[in-house]
Amino acid sequence: MDNINFVTERDPYEKEFHQAVAEVIESVRPVLEQNPLYRNERIMERVVEPERVILFRIPWVDDQKQVHVNRGFRIEMNSAIGPYKGGLRFHPSVNLSILKFLAFEQVFKNALTSLPMGGGKGGSDFDPKGKSDMEIMRFCQSFMSELFRHIGPNTDVPAGDIGVGGREIGYLFGMYKKLANEFTGVLTGKALNWGGSLIRPEATGYGSVYFAAEMLTTRNETLEGKRCLVSGSGNVSQYTMEKLLHLGATPISFSDSSGYIYDEVGIDREKLDHLMYLKNVQRGRVSEYVENYPEAVYVPVDQELDHNPMWKDHKGDCAFPSATQNEINEIDAQNLVTNGVYVVSEGANMPTNPEGVDIFLENKVLYGPGKAANAGGVSVSGLEMSQNSMRLNWPREEVDKRLKDIMKNIHKMCMETADQYGASGNYVVGANIAGFVKVVDAMIDQGVV
Ligand code: NDP
């Protein structure tokens, strides 16, 4: 049970899922060795198997009255410590492997927050790029017309992820409310005026920067004056840059799947506001940024290249990968180290491949894996659920303080767990073991179900 074969044999084509499971198995091996109960209970076999997988048809009609059919998924992975909780992703790459990897990661991430949340993930292979508002609305309504019967405020509480932001959560919530005939906190990431929490949009990016700041305190340093490479230009990336500015650091890059912007003099508040308008209102591409700021450079990126020039051609102190999975391979990781980067905090889920992670660890980079570093988003989702059930709204300062405290605690828990298992400074081992033990102990308490 402590090698990956039983997973690869059962689902041979799910490579992203294998990658996520292999990392956890590798980290928790000493725990399995010390606890024969885990082997007797077949805990590894149980934890990799989703409690339930829901797969459904999503028919919808575009503005030209053409019918399309997409595929919808919800992976209800583990409910040992609370209702299933995790985002919905709308992206053409979505498949069972990607969602199972995300749901698996989510289980341990949610455990690290210390809030009572199980793990899940869902979404569709629908591509929101270039769609009109009405097309997005019709798609979301069709998606929810099936999903609504599987979710609920005490069962499964989805949120946003790639391609699912405030607009989509609004359309999804409207349809849920109509079909279920109840107003409940069934989704998080809602708008403020109908049940959302302050700081939820900011939470993942802010949390990833708080985590980086905590890692730096172990070397008696702060983020002030640090030059930071950031990837992505969506929700996580934007609020990562905002918090970096608050803490006196300088973001110098961001990207989308077509290319990246490098702005040598730094992205200041005014430039970030412009980017937010460009991405969130105009729904444009990052290449358009140079029309307003010609001092910056736009570099198109060929996704087939064996490395990303953004990580190769620019010096920096910190990197915040905040786009997507496997965006940093071993060549990129080595390039980052060569360029002086010694802090990596993952806003995205599993953005670094296993060989890249080894390079960071060998070079003593302060490396915060996504499971720990991007847990701020789901933490504030958990706080949104609490506010919804109490029917009250906490002020901005209170939510931000709770977020900061949660990130501090996650950092401490990872560090102490790594120390305990002889892997000081290795946040991967710390996060995996701390999350794993909490979840599997709850599973054992609840019997073989
Ligand atoms: P968004 O949809 O808001 O933004 C995603 C961004 O990443 C877009 O700018 C997108 O560009 C870019 N991107 C996608 N693929 C690539 C690529 N191959 N190279 C460069 N850029 C790329 O998503 P989020 O910001 O919400 O999510 C980003 C990451 O953070 C994901 O891994 C997600 O799972 C993770 N995450 C998000 C949380 C949240 O609260 N939102 C919580 C925890 C983790 P393009 O427009 O070209 O596709």
Image (spheres, rainbow, N blue to C red):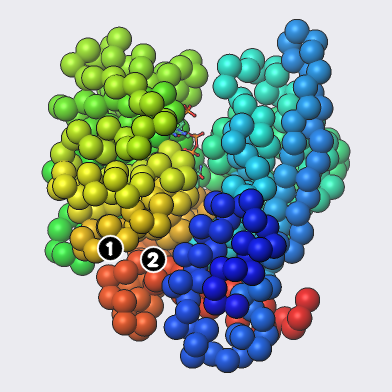
Q: Residue at x 24, y 64 (%)?
A: 362
User: What amino acid type is highlighted by mark number 2?
Assistant: Val
Question: Where does residue 298 sit, x and y in percent of width and height?
Answer: 28, 19
Left or right of 214? Residue 170 is right
Mark number displayed over residue 104: none
Residue of label 1:
361
Check disc 2 and report the residue beneath it. Answer: 428
Q: Is residue 370 left or right of residue 299?
A: right
Disc 2 under 8 Å from ligand 1? The reply is no
Q: Earlier in the sequence, mark 2 or mark 1?
A: 1
User: Which residue is located at x 35 percent, y 26 percent?
Assistant: 301
Q: Amino acid at mark 1?
A: Leu
Determine the image quadrant of residue 176.
Answer: top right
Q: CA distance from mark 2 to mark 1?
A: 9 Å
Can residue 116 be seen? Answer: no
* Mark 2 touches mark 1? (CB < 8 Å): yes
Query: Front-most of 78 and 423?
Result: 423
